[in-house]
Image (spheres, rainbow, N blue to C red):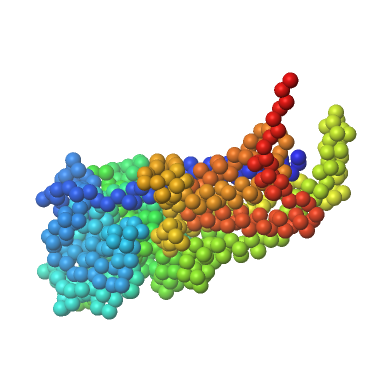
Amino acid sequence: MEYNRNFFIAIGLSLLIILAWQYFYVAPKNADQQKAQEIARQIEKDENAQNQAVPTAENGTVTPPQNKEENNPAGFEMTPDARDAALKKSNRVAIDTPELQGSINLVGAQFDDLFLKNYRLTVDKNSPEIALLNPNGFNTTYIAEFGFTGKGLPAGSLPQFNTEWKVDGENTTLTPKTPVHLVYDNGQGQVFHRVISVDENYMFTISDSVTNNASSVVSLLPYARVARAAPPEHASATYLLHEGMIGVAGDDGLKEEKYSALKDLKPDAANEKKMVFDKVKGGFIGITDKYWAVAAIPPQDEEYTSRFVYFDRLSTHYQSDLTGKAITVASGATETITNHLFAGAKRVETINAYQDNLKILKFELLIDWGWFSIITKPMFALIDILYKLTNNFGVAILLVTVILKAVLFPLANKSYKSMARMKVVQPAMMEIRTKYADDKVKQQQAIMELYRTEKINPLAGCWPLLVQFPIFFALYKVLYITIEMRHAPFFGWIQDLAAPDPTSLFNLFGWLPYNVPAFLMIGAWPVIMGITMFLQMRMNPTPPDPTQAMIFTWMPIVFTFMLASFPAGLVIYWAWNNTLSICQQAIIMKSQGAKIELWDNLKAIFKKKPKKETK
């Protein structure tokens, strides 16, 4: 039948898209989730863990010196005890905000100890908090630093990685209401004052003042860097999401480089692998993970030069840095420069507020909305609005599905009407096929004339399925990248809409006391989705062709297995969308006088076939 052919064209395209997503996105995502559950293993701490790689001033640029620990360039594995021991080796000022806790190392004024209070490794409320920044010497080292470089200046005259800052005043805890004041006197006539403040969320403000008490003019360059020892173990391997170096280089726009791509760059004359963005104005530079980011933000109205750098001989391997506009401080004068540091969760509302309030050029690109942001951003905005009304992202997804069904109703209505009319004219089509059985050309001409007479679009049956895929992709992207969806519960056993359904059909959804292999994790919601897909397909007559009939039967089972590894929120959407489609199609078919085949098809499945008579 013609409409069955169109239906299977749509199914084939659907299967192709699902297979592509399975290969490029879902399989790597499963590996990501498994790695994300791992907590640092206990190992013996090493006394040399603080042998670190940090920047020095060479020709006015930020370049780390060569590390002496060549045999362990990535640092030592971090444990809670080893981390605490490393933090105790230096004087610190504490950080305590509603979102953050940690400390700032007074050696170099480095941001190297930062936990996110409201985010944990797993859905278990007792699991460890996310450690965003970690001190030097470990394979998880992750720091941010601000300082100065310059040409022709004596060693130690500028505050850099090894500068011992002093607290100026009595406050030793950084809170949103109490900034900390640091001071460094180089003993050569220059005094550096640094005021560090923080807001209620994730933005630090670093205000540096340089007072020159010497008789000669001093010229220096401010720098900022974000550096980490190695990619995180859970770094994404998919093309759906960028993790690694990120920045907006003024009018040149978004700049990204994955860890592996930066590592594979060809070394330059200085044997450095780097990307340089020279003389840009506006934007930021940093390193982004799936849900978190650390970014240095220079003054938006001044030129700066930024870089992505990989050092294969150092304990800090990956670095995003910038060098700001030169500062000239006359004798007896004071000059001030203010930078910002973002270190925290990439919440959409928070990121957008920073872009608007601080006028940070394209700061919203810190969240990887992808090429189809024109779809994904409105999709998230709609879900977020409904979430604020219902306080449940799962319910919000169900409501979004209803809204999308209403918006797309004219297209679906036209499509289902065309399919219903095709069923009505099936007797006429069969008559044409019989009449012109030996002349395929006349047969096709007669069928096309029938289509024109009855105003039938033979491809109409494809549209209801094909139109779902942009929406399906947008929802998948939103579930995958937005931290708002991370660990967002629905009802019952679904405690994380961004993760696959944790139950399995093969142990009766937890009733039987044994675990099943990963490839057999076919949860309750994928099973529900498969049932709704089965019912939707049975709304049409079973194809007479045996091959088509087999595909007709097995397609829901194939999709059930494939979608089992997708985020639960997406499977819930698909199941609910199928349910609404069944109801919609039934109503339209009935209004057009077309027979609804569902009940006859279901009866035929369970009807016993008559036994063949034996002679």
Query: Percent x, y for residue 92?
Result: 17, 67
* Nearer to me, 598 or 319: 598
Q: Tell me where residue 28 sits by quadrant.
A: top left
- Residue sitting at the far right: 435
Q: Quadrant of the N terminus?
A: top right
Seen from the viewer's position, the closer of residues 292 and 43 is: 43
Residue occupying the point 45% across, 47% down: 508
Q: Is residue 388 left or right of residue 50?
A: right
Task: Point out residue 605 in the picture as x, y percentages from the top left corner.
Answer: 65, 41
Q: Residue at coordinates 73% horizontally, 26% vertically from top-left?
A: 613
Residue sitting at 40 percent across and 46 percent down? Answer: 512
Instruction: Give x and y (percent) for residue 64.
Output: 23, 52
98 vs 492: above or below: below
Q: Quadrant of the C terminus?
A: top right
Residue 104 found in image quarter: bottom left
Q: Residue shown at 30%/53% (left/top)?
A: 319
Horizontal and vertical percent for residue 588? 74, 57
Q: Is residue 264 visible?
A: yes
